[in-house]
Each structure stands twice: as structure tokens, then as C-alpha cells.
Amino acid sequence: DTGVSQNPRHKITKRGQNVTFRCDPISEHNRLYWYRQTLGQGPEFLTYFQNEAQLEKSRLLSDRFSAERPKGSFSTLEIQRTEQGDSAMYLCASSLGFWRETQYFGPGTRLLVL
Amino acid sequence: QKEVEQDPGPLSVPEGAIVSLNCTYSNSAFQYFMWYRQYSRKGPELLMYTYSSGNKEDGRFTAQVDKSSKYISLFIRDSQPSDSATYLCAMSAEIQGAQKLVFGQGTRLTINP
């Protein structure tokens, strides 16, 4: 399968714990995006990378959130001191990085904070 | 007010019907317009991609963009039960070469056999 993959697919954690999600983009895709989707809503942009550089972060991304893409390939999204309001689907997308690009989404990581 | 408004439905129609899904938006800088389909507990899958105003057809799907009215539509002809999913409109303005997608709320569609 050459699509975007995300791990884990599901995560249940207790409030206050740290969690980390991983995204593996389509090979050779330069751009990688993170979105968050809550129940009954569309995805909301969180941040994106051009290769290893993080170029934009949404206001939604509080100080408890950090994302990395150390070698311009896979990316991780870490949430520290999780809160119940962090419960959502976290989606990763990647694109080639050309004009009029298409973003391809992964299956998402569903987080539940108890 | 949200930048992109989409009727969340739910919308239920019989098999074979023509389905019309719509979104309105407020940001005149949006240039790229997309429709994604999302099955339950899955990631969004791109259906249609249009640039600027006009129509685009792909099989049973037709996307329309009217930038003067800030209104986009997706039509599904000869709808099938397998079309049952949530349909998300998305749009973006190119910022430093990247596209930060802004999504509508999604319309939940059910096609009844």
C-alpha cells in the first residue's frame, strides 16, 4: 500500500498523559499536513511541513502540541498533558508540493482522552 | 461566522436519484475548490478538484463553482448505495505555495436501495 499511513489508529489515554502519533506520507511527497477533526465537523488545519521545515502553525495548536518531521520523511505529533477537549481524529495528509497540488489523507488516529 | 458553510444534513434519498450538495463561503481569496468523500471512521478521499469558476464532470459526479456568488455544488447522478458517506467541501487560497484547506462541516448522505 503506497498511501499515507498513520499509527496508531486508535489511542485511549487518561487526562494528563502524553501521547505521540506518527504519520508516514506518500513517498517523495514534500509537503505534510496535520488536521484535527471532531465529531460532526470537518477537518481543521493544524500545521504543515515543507520537507523538514515547519512553515505554519494554526492558533488551534497550543503550547501542549508539538510536531516534527526530522528528516523530511515521516512526521510525529505529540500532545503533552492531554485534556478531554483533545479527543478527536487526527488526520495527516501529504502532497507533492507543486502548484495546484492535491492532498492525500491518511486514515487518521482517533484519540479518546478519559 | 465560519469561512465555509455546509448543510450538515442528514440527507436521505432513494437509489438512482440525483443528489445536490452545496457550500457557501465568505473568503474571496479562495481559488481552489475540492469535494472529499469520507466513509465512517476513515480519512477523507478526494473526489473532485476545480480551479476557479466553472463546471467539471467526472463520471457520475459534476462539480460547479460560482465565484461571483461564492457558492459551490456537487451533483451525483444515478446515486448508488455505495455513495452513502459524508461529503466534505474544501477550499484554499495558495499561501507561499502551500494550500491550507478550509473544510465545511460535511453533509451526511444516505442512499436507500
Image: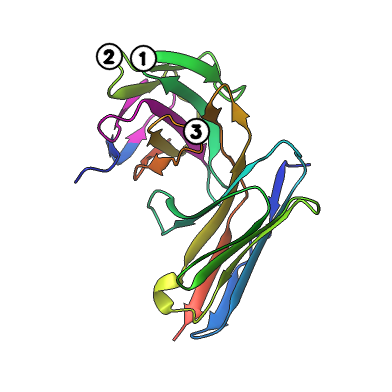
The residue positioned 63% from the left and 34% from the top of the image is B93
- Residue A28 lies in the magenta stretch: yes
The residue positioned 38% from the left and 32% from the top of the image is A96
The answer to which image quadrant residue A8 occupies is top left
Few, some or many residues within 10 Å of mark 1 (<14, 14–19, 20+): some
The spot of residue A34 in percent (x, y) is 45, 30
The residue positioned 44% from the left and 26% from the top of the image is A15
Q: Which residue is under mark 2?
A: A71
Residue type at mark 2: give it: Lys
- Would you say A27 lies left or right of A69 here? left
- Would you say B25 lies left or right of B73 here? right
Callout 3: residue from which chain?
A
- Which part of the image, by quadrant, shows the C terminus of chain B? bottom left
Please report whichever mark, 1 or 2, sits nearer to the chain's N-terminal start. 1
How far apart marks 3 and 1 lie (CA) works out to 19 Å
Tags 3 and 2 both on a single chain? yes
